[in-house]
Amino acid sequence: MAEITAKMVKELRDITGAGMMDCKKALTETNGDIEKAVDYLRERGIAQAAKKSGRIAAEGLANVLVNGNDAIVFELNSETDFVAKNKDFLDLLDKVGNTILNSKATNTEEALEALVDGVKLADVLTAATAKIGEKITLRRVSRIVKEDAQDFGAYSHMGGKIVSLVLLEKHNEEVAKDIAMHVAASNPKFLNRDQVDQETLAHEKEVLTNQALQEGKPANIVEKMVIGRLNKFLQDICLVDQPFVKDGDITVAKYLKDNNNQVLSFVRLEVGEGIEKKEEDFAAEVAAVTKGL
């Protein structure tokens, strides 16, 4: 058995772009033969997938699944919206969702370790990347567990471009669905004002104060203006203060009170949030290619 050195692993990584452990395993399986190791990685789709690892996956779909007292939400990303609509991706979305739901995973890291027919979900996604031809990534996995008397509300908009999950204090299927739909539509950032962190408040107050001063208002008026505008800001970002999406004359808090219920927590995912999308510069790309000829 040939000794597998760090230099050999690095050489194979440089050729294929595969991970260190994958390269080490390939060299071990091929008795240190670099060419055979390259074939080993290519045959398993690892080299091809690794070359795609630097791409930006900002499209895809989110999903929400409920099973008894457990519910999960997650986002599965692809590079293009076109791929997110094909059958292979949709089948993968279902497989990922059911795998996570049936596991004990509570976050993305734990979800990637979950097993699909004895194979880690992370490896399933690597294989899918090679098969589908685009980088496929999993992120923002959350699990909410409810008590028997509580209720889940789940909502999916635009085929999974936006999903929401709401936990209600008491069982009420209609209210749960209404609030989940509201969360998807109105995008609240916090449940109520008590949950708004001081950093967010201080930043917004500073911005609003500077706006008022730029308008040339006297100091005593500025303070009143800031209080009013800050209240409007909090109304916009806090779920219970928002005008209810199905009846703009009442707030979500009033709707919940009328139905003798409360929201305990919520999650909302919109595909691509927080991912910096690559700006394609076709002219620059062509120039770079022709320069290398």
Image: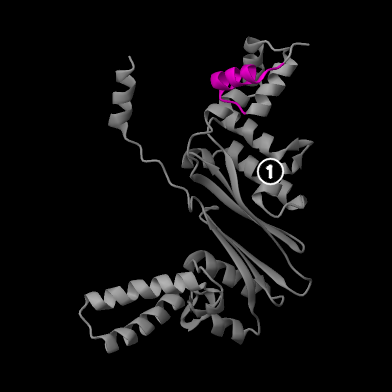
Question: Magenta region's main secondary structure?
Answer: helix
Q: Position of residue 229 (x, y in %)?
A: 36, 80
**Residue pushed farthest bottom?**
220
Q: Which residue is pictured at 27% across the width and 78% down the height? A: 212
Q: Position of residue 23 (x, y in %)?
A: 65, 23
Can residue 85 be seen here? The reply is: no
**Residue pushed farthest left?**
216
User: What residue is pinned by disc 1?
Assistant: 112
Q: Quadrant of residue 155?
A: bottom right
Q: Which residue is pictured at 49% across the width and 39% down the height? A: 79
Can residue 51 be seen here? The reply is: yes
- Decide whether residue 111 is among the magenta residues: no
- What residue span does the magenta drawing correspond to? 4-19
Q: Which residue is pictured at 28% across the width and 30% down the height? A: 283
Return the residue nearer the eye: 206 or 74: 206
Locate the N terminus by quadrant.
top right
